[in-house]
Image (tube, rainbow, N blue to C red):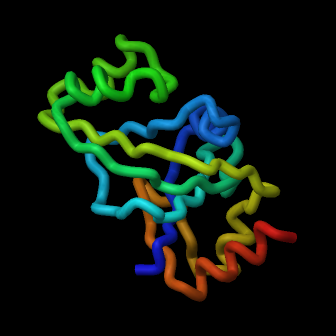
């Protein structure tokens, strides 16, 4: 595990994360990732590109009610949207984000140079060390 992964996020939320106004990403399920992991933000259509990265500060798992009470300020959603998203879910995951940085968009062509047949992840895809290095190099161009 390199400590780097790509996460798919709807474009409006990706923009809010990179602007620093959304500091908590909510998920119904989320793989175990540790603090310090770099998450490359893949903005879904119409952008369809990696647009920046953030660092995981912490990951909290609890009931949806507890997550809302503790983290509602940084979620970027209202209670109705939160309730709809977690309807029927016994657990909610709050990914606390820090150090957001926007990069020049890296579209599917660029991502397929890093990994053959790259497809945007449903949730998250881990990167190998060489893939992470290649992505960092593309982001710095």
Residue 94 lies in quadrant? top left
Residue 21: x %, y % from top left: 61, 29
Q: With 9 as the anchor, is 15 left or right in this view?
A: right
* Above or below for 83 versus 30: above
Q: How many numbered discs, if any?
A: 0
Q: Quadrant of the N terminus?
A: bottom left
Q: With 54 as the anchor, is 79 left or right in this view?
A: left
Q: With 25 as the anchor, is 53 left or right in this view?
A: right
Residue at the left extreme?
90
Residue drawn at x 53%, y 59% is 39
Residue 31: x %, y % from top left: 30, 59
Residue drawn at x 28%, y 21% is 69
Residue drawn at x 46%, y 54% is 56
* Above or below for 71 versus 57: above
Residue 138: x %, y % from top left: 77, 73
Q: Nearer the viewer, residue 1 or 138?
A: 1
Residue 124 lies in quadrant? bottom left
Residue drawn at x 59%, y 81% is 131
Residue at the bottom extreme?
130
Q: Quadrant of the C terminus?
A: bottom right
Residue 140: x %, y % from top left: 82, 69
């Amino acid at each position: 595990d390199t400590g780097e992964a790509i996460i798919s996020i709807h474009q409006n939320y990706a923009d809010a994360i990179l602007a620093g106004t959304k500091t908590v990403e909510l998920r119904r399920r989320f793989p175990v990732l540790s603090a310090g992991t770099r998450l490359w933000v893949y903005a879904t259509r119409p952008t369809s590109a990696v647009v920046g990265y953030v660092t995981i500060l912490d990951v909290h798992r609890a009931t949806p009610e507890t997550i809302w009470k503790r983290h509602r300020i940084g979620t970027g959603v209202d209670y109705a949207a939160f309730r709809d998203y977690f309807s029927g879910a016994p657990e909610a995951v709050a990914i606390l984000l820090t150090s957001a940085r926007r990069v020049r968009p890296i579209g599917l062509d660029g991502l397929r140079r890093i990994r053959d047949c790259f497809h945007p992840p449903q949730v998250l895809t881990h990167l190998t060390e060489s893939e992470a290095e290649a992505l960092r190099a593309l982001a710095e161009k």
